[in-house]
Image (cartoon, helix red, strand yellow):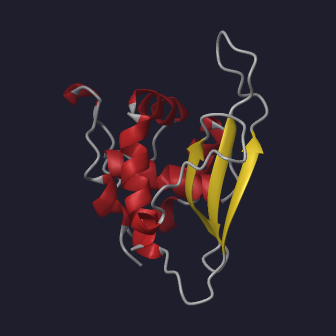
């Protein structure tokens, strides 16, 4: 499997130099492991990291130990979501392999609790799910709630 750290290392670190106690790509990798484990809160991220410290030290340096819940929160608050998506999709594309007959399901959902300020609309999302890989290849906000809205114009770039 391609090491996600090399992809996350390409992400510009928006934190001030004096506020970089933890390595950005390590913060991101722990956050991904936590989310894949079903954990949802910043506090749970810290607890997970502490509980899995010995395992995490097998492939991370963790020079300042496990990040606090406040650190996870602050890091994600200042990251550029588009840049994060770009490196995340590049990593996922490096590990996802489509084979002949592979099923890629395209699914649309209206996300509950996503009212945008000043609007009454719920955010419609479209996802591409690779059945054989068991992961979402990409996800996009649709321009409008319509069957004609197709935000994946060139999905092949995600896994080629």
Residue 118 rendering spot, x and y as whole percentages = 66, 9
Q: Which residue is drawn at 59% across and 53% down?
A: 34
Residue 64 quadrant: top left
Residue 109 quadrant: top right
Q: Which residue is drawn at 40% across and 39% down?
A: 82
Residue 103 rendering spot, x and y as whole percentages = 66, 78
Q: Nearer the viewer, residue 1 or 151?
A: 151
Q: Residue at x 64, y 54 (%)?
A: 127
Residue 12 rendering spot, x and y as whole percentages = 25, 40
Q: Which of 86 and 75 is in front in this view?
A: 86
| Quadrant housing the N terminus | bottom left
In the displayed structure, 34 sits above or below 137; it is above
Q: Do we see residue 57 in this rendering?
A: no
Left or right for 23, reference 58: left
| Quadrant housing the C terminus | bottom left
Q: Which of 55 and 88 is in front in this view?
A: 88
Residue 25 rendering spot, x and y as whole percentages = 35, 51
Which residue appears farthest toward the bottom when viewing the image?
Answer: 100
Exactly how many numbered labels are in the figure? 0
Q: Which residue is drawn at 27% across and 53% down?
A: 9
Q: Do we see residue 149 in this rendering?
A: yes
Which residue appears farthest toward the front when viewing the image?
Answer: 148
Which residue appears farthest toward the left when viewing the image?
Answer: 17
Left or right for 16, reference 122: left
């Amino acid at each position: 499997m391609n090491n996600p750290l090399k992809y996350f290392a390409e992400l510009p670190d928006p934190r001030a130099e004096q506020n970089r106690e933890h390595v950005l790509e390590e913060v991101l990798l722990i956050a991904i492991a936590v989310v894949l484990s079903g954990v949802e809160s910043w506090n749970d991220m810290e607890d997970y990291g502490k509980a899995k410290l010995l395992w995490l030290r097998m492939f991370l340096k963790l020079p300042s130990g496990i990040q606090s819940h406040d650190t996870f929160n602050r890091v994600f608050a200042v990251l550029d979501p588009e840049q994060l998506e770009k490196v995340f999709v590049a990593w996922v594309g490096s590990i996802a392999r489509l084979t002949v007959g592979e099923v890629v399901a395209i699914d649309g959902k209206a996300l509950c609790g996503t009212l945008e300020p000043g609007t009454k609309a719920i955010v419609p999302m479209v996802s591409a799910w690779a059945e054989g890989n068991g992961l979402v290849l990409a996800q996009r906000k649709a321009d409008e709630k319509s069957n004609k809205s197709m935000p994946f114009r060139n999905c092949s770039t995600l896994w080629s």
